Image (cartoon, rainbow, N blue to C red):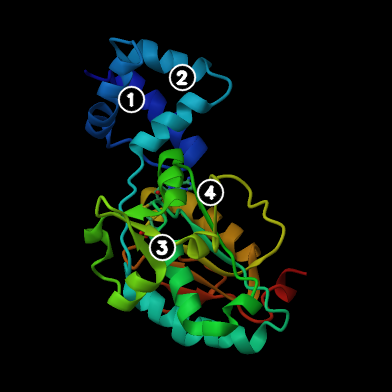
């Protein structure tokens, strides 16, 4: 089914404004990912379907579109240098700096949950028996309800675990009779999955010691990226870190200090500058 230029321009504009995603060059992707869905909804053309989406005040139909148009590609140990830094630098510093043992970590754009579960595994490996003494539940957010639903279940094909050490698979997963692996209950409870659109204000009460937002901003234009990184900065504790994807470039004007590729830090006096 074909999307007219007019429908494409309008849809791309609405999605850019609401979710930051740039779909101006993605007419074919929209057609290929939405055609069957639109037919299943009982429409035989995009124009009428899109009219019903724009008229839907609840916004539910727009989130259905978004779940189909976002790229949720992710895997365990992706960009493993971040997990090395997390364990060898971030947690080491946090252990000596955070006296109340309240550790605030946010995986923003978590997709199917591989990233936050991976961080939770590293946390357990690092703290060992002391893990229970830390309040270290990881916040994991996304705009795709489909991805969030699957992330909460934490069920993965055996193949998806191939980058994880054998001992971690034994410790953190249960094997089902159908051959899939489910993250065990204890680790699932260490991650809180929530819907959050990164284009909206960050309303979480406390600031974060680490924000991980990898391979999400690739789809945003420069201005959207800059505004988001400024919001992240304000939501980061002084001395806290930001991890971005290695393929992503940070905006030229960035308040964080550069640490190493794809890793930034808010200066320890970072909040005083704003006062
Ligand atoms: C390619 S995945 C990256 C997953 C993981 N961070 C990683 O690096 O493997 C990008 C995720 O960002 C999410 N996303 C895109 N735009 C978003 C927005 N405006 N707010 C929140 N999440 C968004 C998508 O739904 C998708 O799950």
Q: Can you say whether 148 is above or below 94 in the image?
A: above
Q: CA distance from mark 3 to mark 2?
A: 32 Å
Reply above or below: 57 against 85.
Answer: above
Of the residues under marks 3 and 4, which one precedes in the sequence? 3
Q: Is residue 43 left or right of residue 228?
A: left
Which residue bears the numbered disc 2?
53
Distance between mark 4 and mark 1 Cα atoms: 23 Å
Q: Position of residue 128 (x, y in %)?
A: 51, 83
**Mark 4 C-beta to ligand 1 under 8 Å:** yes
Residue matched to label 1: 8
Q: Residue 246, percent across and down?
A: 34, 68
**What residue appears at the point 38 percent right and 10 percent down from the top-left corner?**
48
**Could you give the CA–CA distance between mark 1 and mark 2, rounded to whole angstroms?**
14 Å
Mark 3–mark 4 contact, CB under 8 Å? no
The residue pinned by badge 4 equals 198
N-terminal label among 4 and 1: 1
Can residue 9 be seen by looking at this rendering?
Answer: yes
Q: Secondary structure at mark 4?
A: loop
Image-quadrant location for residue 106: bottom right
- Please give left or right for residue 233 compared with residue 4 in the image: right
Q: Quadrant of residue 240?
A: bottom right
What residue sits 37% from the left and 57% below the top? 182
């Amino acid at each position: 089914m074909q999307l007219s230029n007019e429908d494409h321009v309008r849809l791309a504009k609405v999605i850019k404004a609401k979710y930051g995603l740039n779909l101006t060059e993605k007419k074919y992707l929209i057609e290929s990912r939405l055609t069957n869905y639109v037919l299943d909804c009982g429409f035989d053309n995009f124009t009428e379907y899109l009219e019903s989406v724009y008229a839907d005040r609840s916004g539910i139909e727009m989130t259905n579109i978004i779940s189909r148009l976002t790229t949720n590609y992710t895997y365990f140990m992706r960009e493993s240098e971040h997990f090395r830094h997390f364990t060898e630098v971030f947690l080491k510093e946090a252990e000596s700096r955070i006296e109340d043992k309240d550790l605030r970590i946010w995986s923003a754009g978590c997709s199917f949950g591989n990233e936050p579960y991976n961080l939770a595994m590293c946390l357990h490996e690092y703290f060992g028996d002391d893990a229970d003494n830390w309040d270290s539940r990881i916040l994991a957010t996304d705009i795709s309800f489909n991805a969030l639903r699957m992330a909460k279940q934490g069920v993965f094909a055996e193949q998806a675990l191939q980058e994880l050490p054998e001992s971690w698979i034994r410790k953190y997963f249960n094997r089902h009779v159908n051959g899939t692996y489910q993250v065990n209950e204890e680790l699932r409870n260490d991650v809180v999955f929530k819907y959050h659109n990164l284009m909206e204000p960050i309303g979480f009460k406390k600031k974060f010691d680490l924000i991980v937002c990898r391979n999400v901003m690739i789809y945003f234009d420069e201005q959207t990226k800059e505004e988001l990184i400024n919001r992240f900065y304000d939501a980061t504790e002084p001395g806290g870190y930001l991890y971005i994807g290695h393929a992503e470039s940070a905006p030229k004007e960035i308040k964080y200090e550069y640490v190493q590729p794809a890793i930034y830090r808010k200066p320890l006096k970072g909040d005083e500058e704003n006062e």
